[in-house]
Image (cartoon, helix red, strand yellow):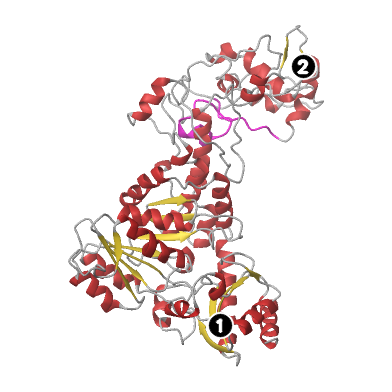
């Protein structure tokens, strides 16, 4: 008979004689006594865990099968482990239920005799020199920053906040009881006569959760935490939280562990101190405006922008005493509690300087897109940031069309950067989300209002954003290349009147775009040589893209803005915004370039 090397992890297995579902106090984090067995290595005890997290090796079932059959009848491997933990409670000094994992860890040095037919030496668990009776923390954990070896945005998008993910999982284990429970809805009879039935309603609700949770820590992907609230084990813990001695999200609207990982990933990409995610890009924009532009403040924005943003500024803000234009409509001066809004051309630096200098109310915020929607105009972020900062105004750039890979608005001087994460960040046309990134002192102001208004991102959506960012660099590289090549082809085609794309020399801000962007994005806008109906015929002749109101995803999307976004306006009213009937916005996906090219050319031939 040989003694398995698996003895380092588990002692001998016997059926527990009595289940104990009590909920004792969890002792403070750290190592019990002098040292604990180094089952998982130095990092396993990180983040102040009071219990180690067990990882079963691939041959676990084979090694335990004989012992399990001798000791128990009709009992799964998990029950054998739970029985062992209960029997060895004396060796650890912890009570059995909530401290089952601690009991197993403390008793891990006891060898297990397994009949393998091969003689193997007994290997004793080594003492962990890092355990000295104090809390154990992962080195560098407070910063939650990505490693210095991640030099490219592509690597950052994949691996940033990996450490944070592990710490969050560890936090789950620290917060919740860590006993492995009998989650089997059937009647089991142990050899010593003990039996119980796990089919009652309370068991179905609580088992595996309130009576103990096993958290997997070695998953490659970030877990999705689907919860609407976070519990406190006792009132004292709640009071500690209220008095800021204990951390908790408390309620799902105030935060989520999965969402935090997505936020930290975006912060890493943008070089931001903090990021907050919301339910959509419009939610992020509107909450930001309400939070940062007070009564009596002054907002400056640009003519070319997402229509719903313009509608919010022109229609909803006036209902709160926030009016548009340099003067009141009745000719009287602004009252102290009225906010003003000035609209300028994206390239109108003189108009911005005039708004900063001549208005009787100091400018609070300059908010614009760069590139803009749908004409892809570019704002000189560095210059406008300097002008605004000299006058004490904030600058917020909506960088959705650029992506964090093509443009670093914060590095160029902006205070905040907004993204509709629905677009490139999510990248698969399957999730809604919006982000705001910047310094914590500003993000905290927005976050406080967000907690009141709601609009929280669903954790499943957060996971989709995390997944999407892992391929962001691959997608954007392909979309940049395809859009640039197709813009050049379209500009030379006789059935195209005009092309709007920052990568073309004909674009009014081409030189600026080359200066402040690494790539020009995957969206190209152009005017077909025809009217509304001819343009619609071209759109309908396309076979690859979907006709839909979005962009930035892996599938190509096309729309005719006069119909898709401005159909409720007359032709003349649409023209005031520059939206002509023959305008097309094409968002290139990741399909093969030659396929997209052939499809567009055949559609042009059809008109």
**Along the line of sight, which residue is nearer the eye, 7 or 574?**
574
First to last magenta residue range: 37-57
Q: Which residue is labeled 1 in the image?
A: 582
Closer to us: mark 1 or mark 2?
A: 1
Number of numbered discs visible in the structure rendering: 2
Which residue is at a point 68% across and 74% down the rendered structure image? 592
**Along the line of sight, which residue is nearer the eye, 180 or 437?**
437
Circle on res. 187 = 2
In this rendering, does residue 601 appear at all?
Answer: yes
Which residue is at a point 55% across and 19% down the rendered structure image? 99
Instruction: Look at the image and say whether residue 41 sits in the magenta stretch.
Output: yes
Q: Quadrant of residue 339?
A: bottom left
**Along the line of sight, which residue is nearer the eye, 469 or 317?**
317
Instruction: Look at the image and say whether residue 425 sits in the magenta stretch.
Output: no
Circle on res. 603 = none
Q: Is residue 322 left or right of residue 144?
A: left
């Amino acid at each position: 008979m040989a003694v398995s090397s698996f003895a380092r992890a588990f002692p001998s297995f016997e059926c527990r004689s009595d289940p104990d579902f009590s909920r004792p106090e969890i002792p403070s984090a750290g190592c019990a006594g002098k040292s604990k067995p180094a089952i998982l290595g130095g990092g396993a005890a990180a983040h102040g865990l009071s219990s180690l997290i067990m990882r079963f090796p691939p041959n676990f079932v084979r090694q335990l099968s004989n012992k399990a059959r001798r000791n128990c009848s009709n009992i799964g491997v998990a029950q054998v482990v739970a029985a062992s933990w209960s029997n060895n409670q004396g060796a650890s000094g912890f009570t059995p239920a909530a401290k089952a994992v601690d009991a197993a860890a403390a008793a891990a040095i006891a060898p297990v005799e397994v009949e393998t037919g091969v003689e193997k030496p007994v290997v004793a668990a080594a003492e962990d020199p890092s355990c000295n009776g104090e809390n154990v923390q992962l080195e560098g954990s407070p910063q939650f920053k990505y490693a210095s070896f991640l030099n490219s945005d592509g690597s950052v998008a994949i691996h940033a906040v990996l450490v944070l993910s592990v710490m969050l999982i560890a936090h789950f284990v620290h917060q919740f009881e860590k006993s492995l429970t009998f989650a089997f809805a059937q009647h089991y009879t142990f050899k010593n006569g003990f039996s119980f039935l796990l089919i009652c309603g309370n068991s179905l609700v609580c088992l595996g959760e309130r009576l103990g949770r096993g958290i997997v820590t070695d998953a490659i992907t970030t877990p999705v935490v689907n919860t609407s609230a976070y519990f406190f084990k006792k009132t004292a813990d709640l009071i500690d939280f209220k008095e800021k001695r204990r951390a908790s999200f408390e309620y799902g609207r105030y935060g989520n562990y999965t969402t935090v990982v997505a936020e930290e990933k975006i912060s890493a990409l943008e070089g931001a101190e903090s990021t907050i995610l919301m339910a959509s890009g419009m939610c992020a924009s509107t909450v930001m405006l309400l939070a940062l532009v007070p009564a009596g403040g002054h907002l400056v924005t640009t003519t070319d922008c997402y229509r719903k943003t313009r509608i919010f500024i022109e229609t909803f803000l006036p209902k709160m005493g926030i009016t548009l234009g340099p003067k009141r409509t009745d000719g009287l001066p602004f009252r102290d509690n009225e906010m003003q809004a000035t609209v300028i051309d994206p390239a109108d630096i003189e108009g911005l300087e005039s708004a900063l200098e001549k208005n009787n109310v100091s400018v609070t915020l300059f908010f614009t897109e760069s590139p803009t929607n749908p004409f892809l105009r570019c704002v000189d972020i560095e210059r406008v940031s300097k002008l605004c900062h000299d006058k004490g105004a904030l600058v917020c750039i909506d960088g959705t069309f650029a992506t964090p890979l093509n443009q670093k608005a914060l590095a160029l001087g902006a205070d905040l950067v907004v993204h509709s994460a629905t677009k490139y960040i999510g990248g698969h046309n399957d999730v809604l989300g919006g982000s705001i990134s910047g310094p914590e002192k500003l993000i905290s102001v927005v976050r406080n209002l967000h907690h009141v208004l709601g609009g929280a991102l669903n954790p499943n959506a957060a996971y989709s954003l995390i997944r999407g960012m892992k391929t962001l660099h691959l997608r954007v590289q392909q979309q940049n290349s395809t859009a640039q090549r197709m813009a050049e082809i379209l500009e030379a085609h006789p059935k195209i009147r005009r092309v709007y794309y920052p990568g073309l020399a004909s674009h009014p801000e081409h030189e600026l775009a080359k200066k402040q962007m690494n790539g020009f994005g995957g969206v190209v806008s152009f005017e077909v040589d025809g009217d509304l109906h001819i343009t619609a015929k071209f759109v309908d002749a396309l076979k690859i893209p979907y006709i839909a109101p979005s962009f930035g995803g892996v599938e190509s999307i096309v729309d005719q803005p006069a119909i898709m976004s401005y159909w409720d306006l007359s032709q003349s009213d649409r023209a005031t915004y520059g939206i002509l009937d023959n305008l097309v916005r094409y968002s290139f996906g990741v399909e093969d370039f030659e396929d997209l090219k052939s499809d567009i050319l055949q559609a042009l031939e059809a008109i």
